[in-house]
Image: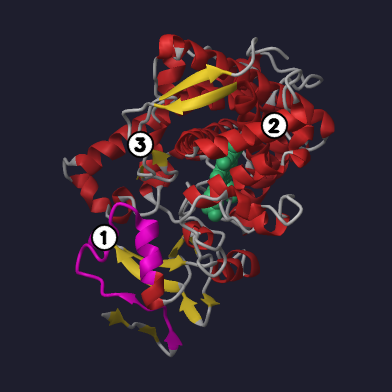
Amino acid sequence: CMWVRSHGQKKTPPGPFPWPLVGNVMQLGQMPHLTFCKMAQKYGNVFQIRLGNHDIVVLNGESTIREALVKHSAEFAGRPKFTSFQVVSGGKSMAFGGYTDLWKVHKRIAHSTLRAFSTVNTDTTKLFEQHVVAETQDLITVFLQLSSNGQYFDPYHECTVAVANVICALCFGQRYSHDDKEFRALVGRNNKFGQTVGAGSLVDIMPWLQAFPNPVRSLYKSFKDLNQEFFDFVKDKISQHRQTYCPDVTRDMSDAFIGHIEHGPGAGDGLSKDYVEGTVTDLLGAGQDTNSSALSWIILLLIKYPNIQVKLQEEIDQIIGEERLPTAEDKVTLPYVQAFIYETLRYTSFVPVTIPHSTTSDVIIDGFYIPKDTVVFVNQWSVNHDEVKWTNPDVFEPGRFLDQNGQLDRDLAYGVMIFSLGKRRCIGDQLSMLKLFLFTSILLHQCSLHPHPGDQITMDCVNGLALKPLPYRISVVPRHASPNQN
Ligand code: HEM
């Protein structure tokens, strides 16, 4: 049944009938983004549900999401004051912080610093590329070791270490070996993070559950511990940096943040010293969870579609040859590799719903009135699986992104929504796209990947802020005589 609400004379979004106490929580299911797509068919692109104490507006479809996040960008730039958000990055998180003047300064510094260490110009891109290439080569060596004598292994943990190392190199000028136990434990616990802050997480929508000893409560406790442990790790690194800080030499992003926030022209902007730790923790967390999901989806799709794997290798062999590794500059000449990456982002939509937003003032969207401080879920999945926009959206077909000349159709590619839009758009977008390109092209240049013959390869996944594939096993075979020649 359609539950029609009104707010004085104003028309509020329709939606399913909210049951007392729980609202619509029982209807969400394991994959809320799929439920939202079904609800959107029934109620329209803007609808409202109730989860615990919160009325939540869900936005679907490209035009509605654009109208909200781009046209009304400031009105939709808030974050809800959820309990779980307050424990992230020592309470000084940019990603989870509310939309204030201080936040604008914080985001600007985080964004410009990240760019300065990755893709701002050709020199920094080269340096960044060296880190990614080194990690990918190391990852390949580990993959080959784990495949020795035809063994099979789950690549997930190795992927998380490789990804974390790239970010750690940028933040601290330091990387860790794949068998460093402490580091593995630290980065390997990210799933719980995403499960608690993802849309539809019970911890926030029904805070009273925290009063009872139950699985939700223990998830929240381990979420708090995980954040504390992560934050302490960063705090320790930053304090070492402070002790050896020298204004003339910026060794890494930690130095850059110390410079900006504590010594530079930005020192008077109101960001206290502990925002340095907060920002670095944000970058490590945000970059890691998402990029490791991306890599594990890429590998899964390569073994699920061996013909596509071969086609990618043919393109790489033809353009690059055996003598050298693919580089960032090869991007334009490898359109099928790019198409494969865009199709992976579209098809998996592994960040199906963004971090929850909230409205910063009353606003009208598609004719519906949404009051200030309403929690808003942005369903990116609905854009990437829209049947009007994509032919057979539920089929994995990289070729859809190539034009008649076999070149990447940029307009179509930019129509994939995975980094969100507007004031809360991801700041790691360019860096991630470059990283995924280098990883995919180098991996396939150097080796072939095979699934365990006894395993069924499914697209089933574990839900959280980022969707992750269920564990799977691969074996990796070198393609050339000397796998890591450069
Ligand atoms: C936010 C996606 C990689 C840093 C976000 C959001 C999404 C997203 C959907 C939420 C936007 C919203 O709430 O509307 C992704 C994907 C990635 C990726 C798909 C990889 C393929 C990274 C990396 C970094 C990063 C590598 C940093 C090193 C951030 C930060 C925010 C954010 C700081 C918070 C922005 C804000 O609240 O204003 N990302 N991300 N992300 N991401 Fe990423």
3 or 1: mark nearer the eye:
3
Circle 2 packing at 10 Å, graded few (<14), some (14-19), many (20+), is many
Residue under label 2, please give it.
316
Give the image quarter of residue 468: top left
Image coordinates for residue 75, horizontal then vertical, percent: 57, 67
Earlier along the polypeptide chain: callout 3 or callout 1? 1
Q: Residue tagged by mark 1?
A: 25
Q: Amino acid at mark 3?
A: Leu
* Label 3 crowd bin: few (<14), some (14–19), many (20+), radius 10 Å: some
Q: SS at mark 1?
A: helix
The correct choice, above or below, for 334 with respect to 83 in the image is: above
Residue drawn 48% across the image and 67% down it: 60
- Is the residue at mark 3 in contact range of ligand 1, meaning its CB lies under 8 Å from it? no
Residue sitting at x 61%, y 20% = 135
Viewer-side residue, 188 vs 452: 452
Instruction: Say whether marks 2 and 3 touch (CB < 8 Å).
Output: no
Residue type at the position of mark 1: Val
Nearer-N-terminus badge (1/2):
1
SS type, badge 3: loop
For residue 332, what is the image quadrant? top right
* Mark 1 vs mark 2, CA separation in Å: 47 Å
Mark 1 or mark 2, whichever is nearer to me: 2
Residue for point 48% across, 57% down: 381
Q: Nearer the viewer, residue 311 or 384?
A: 311
- The residue under label 3 is 470
Q: Secondary structure at mark 2?
A: helix
Q: Is residue 41 left or right of residue 176?
A: left
Disc 2 from disc 3: Cα separation = 29 Å
- Tell me if residue 136 comes above or below residue 105 in the rendering: above
